[in-house]
Image (tube, grey):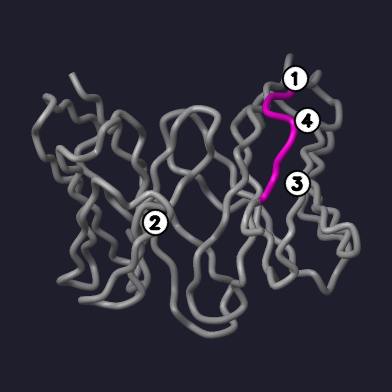
């Protein structure tokens, strides 16, 4: 019940296309859903995050869509660029309180073809 | 320049040796975390600490030990009991404030290889 399932494991998208990564969770107590971006040999960094009281959050070319009833959320990258090539992790936590554990998905390796 | 530093960047260990990975932060964060990253398996939590002189086991604590004697430092020791220690190790920290975003800030990682 603590797992966050992420798909696909790898994704190749043409430059200018839309990249979509999906995640699903079971624990309805989760109330914070971040996405992290990791470049090779580096630590992950927070990209964008959402709380379950909204269905969508957009920051530039990055959008999180959230479906509370289905317990699913997804990351959309519009106009994908070669610089977006990285590994993306979705995550979930009971985070809107004191510091708590974050449960990470298994990651998606995204490659943007020029 | 605030952030998290990890050292060394690369570490080689012979079988049967204990090694200690360093993690230091100057973000004034109360909570600190250690993760292990293997290809295709995401980030798995080893240990975490919410306050000085206190820490809890994560999902894969066997074969590892930590200490939290100072707020800024959270070293991880990989002991000889860890059967497959070759991996990329990541340290992170976050605030402890209620109703915060709980963003975890990650260090650059240490790649440990057992020879």
Inter-mark Cα distance, 4 to 1: 10 Å
Residue at 15% x, 45% y: name it.
Answer: B20
Residue underneath mark 1: A12
Prevailing SS of the magenta stretch:
strand
| A9 in magenta | yes
**Disc marking residue A71:** none
Inter-mark Cα distance, 2 to 4: 28 Å
**Disc marking residue A23:** 3
User: What chain does mark 1 sit on?
Assistant: A
User: What chain does mark 2 sit on?
Assistant: B
**Contact check, label 4 and label 1, Cβ < 8 Å:** no
Element class at badge 2: strand
Element class at badge 1: strand
**Disc marking residue A80:** 4
How packed mark 3 is, by other alpha carbons closer than 10 Å (few <14, some 14-19, many 20 or more), is: many
Q: Estimate the x, y position of residue B44 in percent, counting from the top left.
A: 46, 47
Q: Estimate the x, y position of residue B6 in percent, counting from the top left.
A: 26, 46
User: What chain does mark 4 sit on?
Assistant: A
| 3 vs 4, front mark | 3
Image: magenta residue range:
A4-11
Q: In which quarter of the image is residue B21?
A: top left
Residue at 73% x, 55% y: name it.
Answer: A25
Q: How many labels does the image show?
A: 4
> Do discs 2 and 3 belong to a common subunit?
no
| Nearest to N terminus: mark 4 or mark 1 | 1
**Contact check, label 3 and label 1, Cβ < 8 Å:** no
Q: Estimate the x, y position of residue A90 in percent, counting from the top left.
A: 66, 48
Residue underneath mark 2: B92
């Amino acid at each position: 019940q603590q797992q966050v399932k992420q798909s696909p494991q790898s994704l190749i998208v043409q430059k200018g296309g839309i990249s979509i990564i999906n995640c699903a969770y079971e624990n309805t107590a989760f109330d914070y859903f971040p996405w992290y971006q990791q470049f090779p040999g580096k630590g992950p960094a927070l990209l964008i995050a959402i709380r379950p009281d909204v269905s969508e959050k957009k920051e530039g070319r990055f959008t999180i869509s959230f479906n509370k009833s289905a317990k699913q959320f997804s990351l959309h990258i519009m106009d994908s660029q070669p610089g977006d090539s990285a590994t993306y992790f979705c995550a979930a936590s009971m985070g809107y309180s004191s510091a708590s554990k974050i449960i990470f998905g298994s990651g998606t390796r995204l490659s943007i073809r020029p | 320049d605030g952030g998290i530093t990890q050292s060394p960047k690369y570490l080689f260990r012979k079988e049967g040796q204990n090694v200690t990975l360093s993690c230091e932060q100057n973000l004034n964060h109360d909570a600190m975390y250690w993760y292990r990253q293997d290809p295709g398996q995401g980030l798995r939590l080893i240990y975490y600490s919410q306050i000085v002189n206190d820490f809890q086991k994560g999902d894969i604590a066997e074969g590892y030990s930590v200490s939290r004697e100072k707020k800024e430092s959270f070293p991880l020791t990989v002991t000889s009991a860890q059967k497959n220690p070759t991996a990329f190790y990541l340290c992170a920290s976050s605030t402890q404030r209620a109703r915060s975003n709980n963003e975890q800030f990650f260090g650059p990682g240490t790649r440990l290889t057992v020879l």
